[in-house]
Image (cartoon, grey):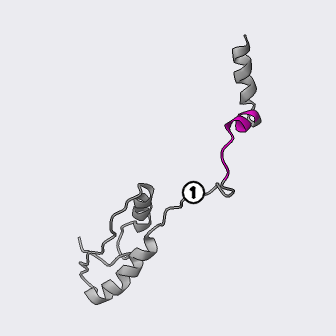
Amino acid sequence: MRLRSLGDGQVDFCRIFSKLAQYEFEGWAVLEWECCLESSEQGAKEGAPFIAQHIIQIAERAFDDFAGSVTDDGANRRTLGLAERIENKYAD
């Protein structure tokens, strides 16, 4: 196996950084340089921005929480027709 520059090989960095974000990884993203073709100076110049572009900042709220509102479970159940079923179930 020949080691290559970031993005030149077969590693799916988008998927890796997505998983790190999904599991709220708080560690460092470190570049270890071992390319058989490129100089380490060029690798550092390209590698650091490559990593920075792939780091995902976690959202502080859900994407669909645009109004910052509180969930009204009762209203949701009524809208779905579930509240009536529960009330009728216990009416007998």
The residue that mark 1 highlights is: 61
| Any part of residue 39 in sight | no
Quarter of the picture holding the C terminus: top right
Q: Residue furthest top?
A: 92
Quarter of the picture holding the N terminus: bottom left
| Any part of residue 37 in sight | yes
State the extent of the magenta-drawn residues as a range. 69-78
Residue occupying the point 35% across, 73% down = 9
Residue 6 in the image, given as x and y percentages of width and height = 35, 76
Is residue 76 found inside the magenta-colored segment of the image?
yes
Establish if 47 lies above or below 28.
below
Residue occupying the point 73% across, 21% down = 87
| Location of residue 84 by image quarter | top right
Left or right: 4, with 88 as reference point = left
Establish if 34 lies above or below 59.
below
| Location of residue 29 by image quarter | bottom left
Residue occupying the point 69% across, 41% down = 72
Establish if 30 lies above or below 40.
above
Tell me the chief SS of the magenta region. Answer: helix
